[in-house]
Amino acid sequence: MNLPNKLTVFRIILIPFFIIVMSLSFGGSVMVLGTSISISRLLGTLIFVVASLTDVMDGKIARKNHLITNFGKFADPLADKMLMTTAFFFLVAAHTVPAWVAAIIACRELAVTGLRLIIVESDGEVFAAQLPGKIKTVSQMFAIFFLLMNNVIFDLINIPMDQILLYVCLFFTVYSGADYFIKNSHVFADSFEK
C-alpha cells in the first residue's frame, strides 16, 4: 500500500473518531474570535480539517509520484463521500443545515457511487474523480468547516459565509452529479434499445 492510499485509509479511520467526538458533549465551550463554540464541536472540526488535508495530500502525492492505483481511484472519492455525508448529518442534527440540502447531497453521492460501479462493470476500469467532482469536494470542505465553526471568522464582519458556502457547495454537488451522468450516459445505452 503506497503513501496516498495510506492517507486515504487514515481519512476513513478518522471518521469514527469524528462521529464519537461530535456525539459527545464535553460540557464546556470556548470563545473563538468572540463566538462561543462547544469543545466537542471544536475537536470535531479539528478532526474534520485533518481528514480534509489528507484528501489534498493524497491526490498531490499520487499524481506527482505516479502512484495512482485502482484502489486510490475507488477509495479516495468514497472516503470523501463518507466524511462529507457524516458531517452534513451532524450539521442537520444541530439545526445548522436544512435537511433538504443534506438529502440532495446524500442522494447525489449515492447516485454517483452507483454510476461508478456500473462503469467498472461495463468498462472494466475505475472512473477517477473529474474536475467538477473535485470542485464539489473542496466547496463542501469549506462549507462544512465554516458551518462547524459557527461562521466564526466572518461573524466579525457580519457576512453569513457559512450559509453562502453551503449553497455554493449545493450548486457544485448537483452540477458535478449531472456532469458525471451526462459524460457517462453510454453505460445506459442498452437500457434504451428496442
Image: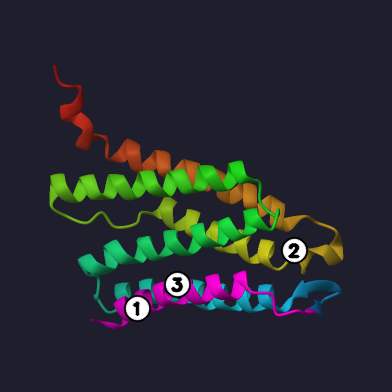
Of circles 2 and 1, which is in front?
2
Mark 2–mark 1 Cα distance, whole angstroms, equals 31 Å
| Type of amino acid at the residue the image marks with label 1 | Ile
- In this orientation, which residue lies closer to the viewer: 61 or 141? 141
User: Under tag 2, what secondary structure?
Assistant: loop
The numbered disc on residue 151 is 2
Label ID, residue 139: none
What SS does tag 1 mark? helix
The amino acid type, in three-letter code, at marker 3 is Val
Name the residue nearer the viewer: 135 or 189.
189
Image vertical order of residue 34 relative to residue 176, above or below: below
Q: Residue at x 70, y 57 (%)?
A: 162
Name the spot of residue 29 as percent of width and height, x first. Answer: 79, 78
Q: CB of mark 3 within 8 Å of CB of mark 2?
A: no
Few, some or many C-alpha atoms within 10 Å of disc 2 (few <14, some 14-19, many ≥20)? many
Of marks 2 and 1, which one's residue comes earlier in the chain? Answer: 1
Which residue lies under the disc numbered 3? 56
Of the two numbered discs 3 and 2 on the same chain, state the one appearing first in sequence.
3
Query: Which quadrant holds the N terminus?
Result: bottom left
In the image, the segment drawn in magenta is 1-29
Q: CA distance from mark 3 to mark 2?
A: 23 Å
Q: Which mark is residue 61?
A: 1
Using residue 4 as the reference point, say whether residue 189 is left or right of it: left
Q: Earlier in the sequence, mark 1 or mark 3?
A: 3
- Please name whichever residue, 60 or 111, is drawn nearer the observer in this view of the structure: 111
Pointer 2 with pointer 1, Cβ within 8 A: no
- The residue lying toward the viewer, choosing from 1 and 13, is 13
What x and y, as percent, mark residue 157?
85, 63
